[in-house]
Amino acid sequence: MTNIQIILNTILSKNIFEYLLIDRDLKVVNTSVGVLKYMENVPYEGDDVLMHMPEFLGFEEKLKEVFEKKDFTYTFKTIQKNGYYMNISLDHYNHDIALVLLQNITKMTQAQQQLLQYSNETTLLYHALQKIIDAQNSLLFVTNSDDRIEFANQTFLHYFHAENLDEIKAKALKLYPYVNKNIKSYNELHKHIRGSEINLNIGNDTFIMQSTAIEETHRLFTLSRVTDIYEKKKSLEAEVEVDALTSVYRKKYFDLRLEQLLKEENNFALIVVDIDDFKAVNDNYGHTVGDDVLKEFAFLLKKNIRQDDLIARWGGEEFLLVLKMDDLQRAMDRTETLRKMLDEHTFKHIGHLTASFGLAWRGQCDCDDANSLLQRADKALYKAKNNGKNRVILKKLEKRGENCIV
Amino acid sequence: MIRKKILLIGDFNVGKTSLIRRYVDNTFDDRYLTTIGVKISKKKILLNDEECELLIWDLEGATPQKSIPKTYYGGASGAILVGDVSRFETIKNLDEHMEVFKQINPNGSYVIAYNKSDLLKLDQIKSLQNIENVFLTSAKNDINVEKMFIALAKEIFND
């Protein structure tokens, strides 16, 4: 007993450890004075150890083992007792005595508890936010520094028929080509949107897409489905912005759409079309026939361009076209096809008719704008008229900015 | 006096500590204070005119980062597996907690607490009622708490 008490007193002087000594009958033999603070009742010699240490209940076999095995030690970690946290270890001393050592770890555990509390609250918040995000009607997804989708909400998964996020990840779903074929990554898409919003068409659906930077590496994309609103808007616009005679857009609306197209950085051709010798039609057949010709002319143009392209009446017998094309040569070829189609068409009252086309190409250029495009197309048309009419003339961009790719 | 050890097991913030407080002290506090390690509470009960004591181990909840240390499970006669009805994943994880408990205590009894049932609507409560071993509890509104502890105690002490 003397030796063990010397050792224990040395340990106890550090005010970290307290002890109980117990015998083979699991009765208390002795305790340190400081052990009282951890107990509900004062432990007396001869008390059943389970009275004071209920933690040992169910471990009676282990308690017996400690007297037999010299190297035996068993520890209960992080036990809260009387407002303190402690590790309780059970050690062999000899065949008759075992040592129950109580190590006060209150300060350390309280610090850990604060961290755990913070961590758990953060996890709860994360789950709550995830539920909120999943409940949104908008499609949300987050991309990472590897330009891959790292998170998507339930609405997004549902829209793309995915059971879970792993399916989306496995598909390596890319939405940027829907915006513009020249965009090659989500990072580029984020730059393209530039804190604003763009329209995005997927199948028959129209979305408003927004992008937000999360830290340096991640991007949050939001797609709000506006198909119905968009359709109604288009239908209303059509009613308000359409030329009553020819049923194509008015110049004012065309200008708005042109500004939008310029923001979207797509390649396209702007074309001014003018009916050749239209004055003679009015003079020879009267204005009523003239109006019919204008109607038929506009109808033919509209019928022979794509739904995605744009047509408007500038005034009189002049029309404006936007043909969305990847490269200039294809735009020239399509314009030539239009010219040829008109040339070969037999108009109702007058038979044969031709038109001249002035074309300006919109490449990626920081010095090009709506005015510059219209002026070039108009000059090209003037040249087409002067060179014999019934032809397509291109007017190239003369003044080039630093970033011109024409 | 016969004493038995029972455990409250489940994910964090499902209300294990609140169930014990309600049962032992008949109190409730809706502030969330995470449990670290284990705290043992005692409750004396009369079963068949005999005084028995439950040593109720309130275990630190499992988190996505950290599971419950298995050393706490040893020597338990029974367990209350606690899930939060407002967090489906905590209900889903009960199977896993039960497996660990039964692995260490093959003869141990258990009951399941779908806690925070005060958050459920009437039709939801109806659909969850009458599931074997499951108690729809609310520590907040003191619903089925004592009933559940007694049911487990009877099973343990009768064994």
Image (cartoon, grey):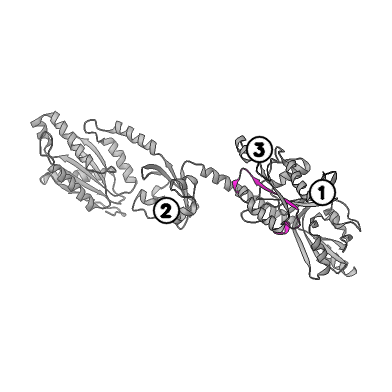
> For residue A46, which quarter of the picture?
bottom right
For the point 11% across and 29% down, the residue is A286
Q: Residue furthest left?
A: A284
Q: Tell me the CA gap for discs 1 and 2.
A: 60 Å
In the image: residue A38, left or right of residue B126: right
Q: Secondary structure at mark 1?
A: strand
For the point 76% across and 48% down, the residue is B155
In the image: residue B122, left or right of residue B39: left
Labels 1 and 2 positioned on one and the same chain:
no
Residue A153 visible to the viewer: yes
Residue A147 visible to the viewer: no
Residue under pointer 1: B53
Residue under pointer 2: A173
Split into 4 quadrants, where in the image is the N terminus of chain A?
bottom right
Q: Please name the amino acid that badge 2 sits on.
A: Leu
Residue under pointer 3: B118
- Highlighted range, magenta: B70-89
Q: Are marks 1 and 3 in contact (CB under 8 Å)?
A: no
Front-lying residue, A75 or A323: A75
For the point 33% across and 49% down, the residue is A265
